[in-house]
Image: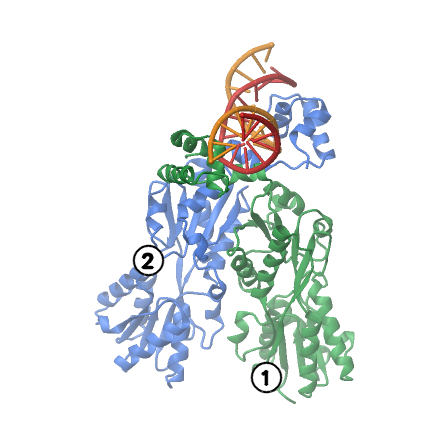
Chain colours: A blue, B green, C red, D orange
Amino acid sequence: MATIKDIAKKAGVSITTVSRALNGYSDVNEDTRKKIIETAKSLNYSPNTIARSLVMKKSRTIGLLISGLMRESAKDNFMIEVMTGVNDFASQTDYDIVLFNTNSSKQREKTYTQLCRERKVDGVIIQGIRTDDPYLEEVVEGEIPCVLVDIPKIGRYAGYVSSDNAAGSFEAGNYLAEAGHTNIGMINGHEYAFVSKERLTGFQKAMMEKGISFQADHIENGDFTEESGERAALTLLERDPAITALFCASDLMAIGAMNGLRAKGYRIPEDISIVGYDNILLSRYVQPSLTTIAQDTHGLGYEAAKMLVDMLDHDGKPRRTLVKHELIVRNSSIMR
Amino acid sequence: MATIKDIAKKAGVSITTVSRALNGYSDVNEDTRKKIIETAKSLNYSPNTIARSLVMKKSRTIGLLISGLMRESAKDNFMIEVMTGVNDFASQTDYDIVLFNTNSSKQREKTYTQLCRERKVDGVIIQGIRTDDPYLEEVVEGEIPCVLVDIPKIGRYAGYVSSDNAAGSFEAGNYLAEAGHTNIGMINGHEYAFVSKERLTGFQKAMMEKGISFQADHIENGDFTEESGERAALTLLERDPAITALFCASDLMAIGAMNGLRAKGYRIPEDISIVGYDNILLSRYVQPSLTTIAQDTHGLGYEAAKMLVDMLDHDGKPRRTLVKHELIVRNSSIMR
DNA sequence: ATGAAAGCGCTAACAT
DNA sequence: ATGTTAGCGCTTTCAT
């Protein structure tokens, strides 16, 4: 593997000159530069980014910490879309992405901060970690530039991107109310997700404004999976068979709810209207297709990367960025 | 950021001793080691992997080159499953994964080899590149340990994982023939995918063995997308309205075919039986659910990572690994 | 415009 | 069992 030393020798100049020539500095004779670039080519030279990183103290990599990137999560194309968003922005820059393995027990001995410091990433994008994650505070308080996805926390070096979950849920509630529903249940996510609180708040607000009674016994928590949605739906309808609509904090839970309900003889949407959240790929394909609040998932990742690179390259301040959301009415919900 | 130098000073030993103590060498007094580990902790020390990589000439990273990792590919959870497979294996090792941005025009000036050499990855897993990719040969012939996914090429430092596409297609053909179909069309992928050839070969073999006529006019190529599947299906049935079954080289094309056909008044599976390939997530959810050849996609990634790490850490030879496949009969196909 | 020299943080002979 | 030294490949003062 050729180094600048080899080039210097062959071109009969010093390594300093080679370095300067290759990096486009102006204080080098154009003829020398030409010769150097040629010899570099002839030696099939590739710069060693490791060596460069060591001296520059910049690795030109950003860490992507996706907690729960595992087999099951493929179902929910949320994560992958965020990831492609990150990738799409990163590919416009010269940052590479390092995927951190966080589902391994081995790595979990280390805090996120340690992970980042060891791998010397310049910044990190964090997605999918829970509110009770012991290392969350550390990274928000820490010195490593960091952008959180769907975790509303801002620190000295930590910003976040999210969609307006309260507003989205508010719209969902509004829509159901205006469709004539007056007895509505909600399947929320678990309490360890930030979005859960916000989605509940927004939905409650809509119910309140519409003058619809909405008590705790009409709320059931799942864990964002199909199975939990099914269970929650059945529980809610057992508790109050008069419910005519269900708002679910994730599409996957909504799909589970539809399946569970249908198995019990309920017709969707004739008996029960269902509204989900996320607009995952599946929601367009299930029968009936799912009414849902779409998030710009790709934008979540894209904006996260953008903010991080802005912090890294242009001394940008950490901030809050909201991506758009939108109610998409399909066939799982109906006027009463 | 504390370095071993700081530790050495504070502990009153040389940096060599610190290095040895921290790396678990045996030739260091246990008391010294204890003291060193303590000082390291007190200084909140993290090793600098960059510096280590530089001297060891090993970065403990593997590159993941997913050509076409972009927004659209989220639909097809094939890539993400391969990726989680890679990730799942890698997280059992101390290798980290670097995602290479290959969809950017900027990077495409560089060959894969350059990309790898610059980022100093120890090895690379390549997925989704086409047979006509100008840089494919270079990496197969090259010196960088490499595992290809679904590209049957072996080199001095290049192995591959795949499923037995010919056998899978053979099974599909067999199944349709035994279900009584005698006039069958095939929607194949484009000629730039290795799997296309194999899937055609296997299917042809089944037709031949069953004594079913299967000519070129019953084959139409798509590009693995829904739209192309729709188009191809329509073309085939216009050409021969007597076709009763369609074998599609990807589920996405199969889904497109179903939609296109249904729009033209064909009933699936009563009029036309459809068999896909891949068993993507959607295939279970579409109506009717799709009969397909399942690939162990996760296994593809898992085995790729395994082979690569074996080559890297245990001097394993590049080889061919096949993951299993399986016919999954659902509701898009029927006996005649 | 070019070069000499120092040093980034670490490992690994080679002493002792 | 511990220290001294050199060096990985690069960038960056500081001279000239």
Q: Provide the secondary structure element on which disc 1 rests.
A: loop
Q: Residues within 10 Å of mark 1 (few under 14, many from 20)?
A: some
- Residue type marked 1: Arg
Q: Where B77 falls versus A237 (above or below)?
A: above
The residue lying at 50 percent from left, 39 percent from top is B27
Residue A310 x/y as whole percent: 44, 40
Q: Is residue A274 above or below residue A206?
A: below
Q: Is residue A269 visible?
A: no
Circle 2 residue: A194
Subunit ID for the residue under disc 2: A
Viewer-proximal residue, B318 or A139?
B318
Q: Nearer the viewer, residue B165 or B317?
A: B317
Question: Can residue A274 be seen in this snapshot?
Answer: yes
Q: Which residue has dot 1 on it?
A: B267
Where residue A69 sits: x, y (%)? 47, 59
Quadrant where the image shows the C terminus of chain B: bottom right
Kindly state the secondary structure of the residue where label 2 is placed. helix
Location of residue B226 in the rendering, given as x and y in whole percent from the top left corner: 60, 68
Which residue appears farthest toward the bottom when viewing the image?
B336
Residue D9 sits in quarter = top right
Indicate the position of residue B294 as horizontal and vertical percent values.
60, 73
Quadrant in which the N terminus of chain B is drawn: top left
Is circle 2 on the same chain as circle 1? Answer: no
Is residue A323 or residue A216 the one in the foreground?
Answer: A216
Question: In whole angstroms, how far apart are the C-alphas of marks 2 and 1?
Answer: 46 Å
